[in-house]
Image (cartoon, rainbow, N blue to C red):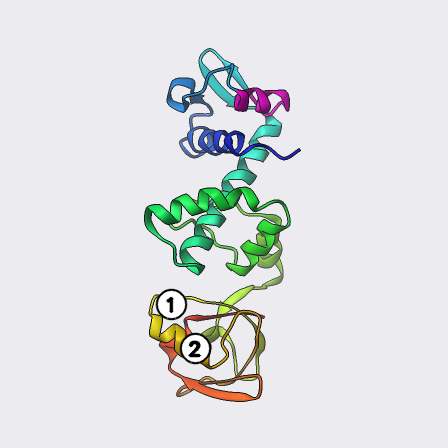
Amino acid sequence: MKLTDKAEEILEALWIESEENGKGYAELDRMEIHPSDAAYQELASQALVEIKGGRIYFRPEGKEEGRKTIRRHRLAERLMMDVLNIRGENGDMKACQFEHLLNEGVDVKVCTMLNHPATCPHGKPIPAGECCEEARRIGDLGVVPLTELKSGDEGDIAYILTEDGKKMQKLMAMGVLPGNRITLLQAFPSYIFRVGFSEFAIDSAMAREIFVRR
């Protein structure tokens, strides 16, 4: 059953207090939760959390749900800031809105696109998913910069990571667009690649800003 946004926010806050801060619980006053709150009642009815002596605790089923919820939130932060270049307070706000759309399956695709990041932009850990463990097991790096490819390697362009508008326009004019197929022809002394029927040469700095899904 899909939880409401407010219920998910409670799980996130409880995860930080109980798991990352090592307390094993959170104070109700600090969480600003009352037992009669609809969001708490929603979580309690699904046996995810419980209140004892002015403190809120995860139940066993709730701890796993909390882990998944904080994972979605921090993946959303990575997506907003690393890919869409939306930073600061606006980036945090957009991440909070977007995380609720990362249902199971969507979060795996986002995580793979981001190359299974270990931390959020603020340095907080992103709990690993099954996709992360599988990628490590088989040595699949997922999405990597063009500079990680060898001559003859090819893949689909995932995204461009640059804050320079002129660079972005130049790459887009070359056909470097998400979803397009790219083949690396040469990696030294400059990077030469093919997109469609055209070939282009760029320096290593620009090549590091093109991310490819192999």
The crowding category of the residue bearing disc 2, from other C-alpha atoms within 10 Å (few below 14, some 14 to 19, many at least 20), is: some
Please provide the residue range marked out in magenta: 38-49
Is label 1 in a helix, a strand or a loop? loop
Residue type at tag 2 = Leu
Label 1 and label 2: CA atoms lie apart by: 10 Å
Where is residue 100? Give x, y as percent: 54, 41
Q: Main secondary structure of the magenta part?
A: helix
- For image coordinates 54% across by 60% down, the residue present is 113
Q: Position of residue 201 (x, y in %)?
A: 43, 87
Residue occupying image coordinates x 46% and y 16%: 34
**Residue 41 belongs to magenta span:** yes
Compared to residue 22, the image places residue 72 above or below, namely: below
Q: Are marks 1 and 2 in contact (CB under 8 Å)?
A: yes
Give, as a three-letter code, the residue at label 1. Thr
* Residue toward you, 138 or 179: 179
Q: On the rendered image, what quadrant is the N terminus found in?
A: top right
Say which quarter of the image contains residue 202: bottom left
Label 1 Cα neighbours within 10 Å, binned few <14 / some 14-19 / many ≥20 = some
- In primary-sequence order, the first of circles 1 and 2 is 1
Left-right relation of 126 to 131: left
With respect to residue 189, does 148 lie above or below?
Answer: above
Residue with the mark numbered 2: 171
Q: Magenta stretch: residue 192 in it?
A: no
